[in-house]
Amino acid sequence: MTLKKYSIPFNKPHLCGQESEYILDAVSSGHISGNGKYTAWCQKNIENRFGISNCLLTTSCTDALEMAALLLNIKEGDEIIVPSYTFVSTANAFVLRGAKIVFVDSKLECPNMDEDQIEQLITPRTRAIVPVHYAGIACQMEKIMDLAKKYNLYVVEDAAQAVNGYFKDSNDKRKALGSIGHLSTFSFHETKNIISGEGGMLGINEIDFLQRAEIIWEKGTNRSAFSRNEVSKYEWKDLGSSFLPSEITAAFLFAQLEKIENIQNRRNEIWNYYHLHLTSWANEYGIQLPHIPKYSTNNAHIFYMVFQNQVVRNRFINSLKSSGISTIFHYLSLHRSPYYSKKHGDRKLPQSDRYSESLVRLPLFYDLTSAELQFIVETILEFKP
Ligand SMILES: *Cc1c(COP(=O)(O)O)cnc(C)c1O
């Protein structure tokens, strides 16, 4: 029996160093429920850095999506255009309000929604388009915003994976992902680039939504306005729920935000190493690597590869596993899910299915060592698809 050289997980949460100090500070300052100074600091930090008009921290991206559905007054019979290749919450948040999900296929070049297939899916009942910036790679936001304008629809960017990602418009002007749609949602789950365990954020670029968003955020009350002394009592004003995280979570997140450049640099180094060393091998075997369109930057959230089929993909996962390297596949097409396939019907979404069956993600986390990275690449290069 040979000893395994390494045991490399797919992901390992990175600690920036200041997390426990800030948590301790939050605790000793006596305010550990939500909407305190760390929440305000995180929100300001992100608003300023990324040009998102207003941000509200949430306990998850799932929560931020649910807030978006409430804010848009989504109701029974409304239709929402969502990619099939995404996390369940992107669709579920709207289904909770009674909406019908109209799934759109992915692109050939990357798992993002195919913007050229959206218009044919729009009906008089369509209310919103929800682009998901898969792997932090931008969707074609110019085309999507133009369609939204033409048909009077809202755009909610699911930017869960897209922190520090940018869209470059046709004038080469950079706009941060999450600053373009009417609303946007982020995740700080431990698998994302910037983390707080569980955590998320709603971005509000349409200023008219702000007042109601604060009410929905605070259980349907105007407590936020009350705490700013704008009203003399707080009361039940609207629908809402408990969407805000505690200051403990916000303190953790703030320590991460302070180190965002450092985190991004290391992730990009790892991503670029994979790309440099795997490209000719991938070309030789017809394996699809991440494609960064001209209109997108790369935030190095995911390094994925797409094999010819599921059999080879699974053989690859097992082969790397036997060398102590954990690689994992990703979403299963939502239009074929046990919960939604009947409601979807039999309209085919072949690209989404292809990514479901054949995509795999490589380990990518801050603390991955250069020796481990080299070992992963060497092991992959020995694999014969
Ligand atoms: C991670 C993720 C979510 C969910 O984020 P949570 O913070 O865990 O709720 C939603 N959408 C996409 C595209 C994601 O990657």
Image (tube, helix red, strand yellow):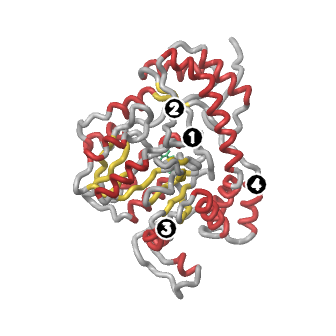
Which amino acid, by three-letter code, is at mark 2?
Answer: Pro
Q: Is residue 67 above or below residue 188?
A: below
Q: Are marks 1 and 2 in contact (CB under 8 Å)?
A: yes
> Where is mark 2, residue-wise?
290
Label 1's element?
Answer: loop
Q: Which mark is residue 137?
A: none
Q: Is residue 269 above or below residue 180?
A: above
Neighbor class of circle 1 (other Cα within 10 Å; few <14, some 14-19, many 20+) is many
Confirm whether residue 186 shows in the render: yes
Mark before the other along the chain sequence, 1 or 2: 2
> Where is mark 4, residue-wise?
18
Q: CA distance from mark 3 to mark 2?
A: 36 Å
Q: Is residue 220 above or below residue 334?
A: below
Q: Which is more toward the observer, 76 or 131?
A: 131
Mark before the other along the chain sequence, 4 or 2: 4
Mark before the other along the chain sequence, 4 or 1: 4
Q: Are marks 4 and 3 in contact (CB under 8 Å)?
A: no
Q: Quadrant of residue 23?
A: bottom right
Q: In the image, residue 157 lies at what x, y percent?
A: 45, 52
Q: CA distance from mark 4 to mark 2?
A: 33 Å
Image depth: mark 4 or mark 1 in front: 1
Q: Are marks 3 and 2 in contact (CB under 8 Å)?
A: no
> Where is mark 1, residue-wise?
298
Which amino acid, by three-letter code, is at mark 3?
Answer: Trp
Q: In the image, residue 261 lies at what x, y percent?
A: 69, 48
Image-based side of 43 in relation to 311, left or right? right
User: Looking at the image, which residue is at 36% across and 58% down?
Assistant: 154
User: Looking at the image, which residue is at 59% across and 22% down?
Assistant: 278
Label 4's element?
Answer: loop
Mark before the other along the chain sequence, 1 or 3: 3
> Where is mark 3, residue-wise?
217
Neighbor class of circle 2 (other Cα within 10 Å; few <14, some 14-19, many 20+) is some
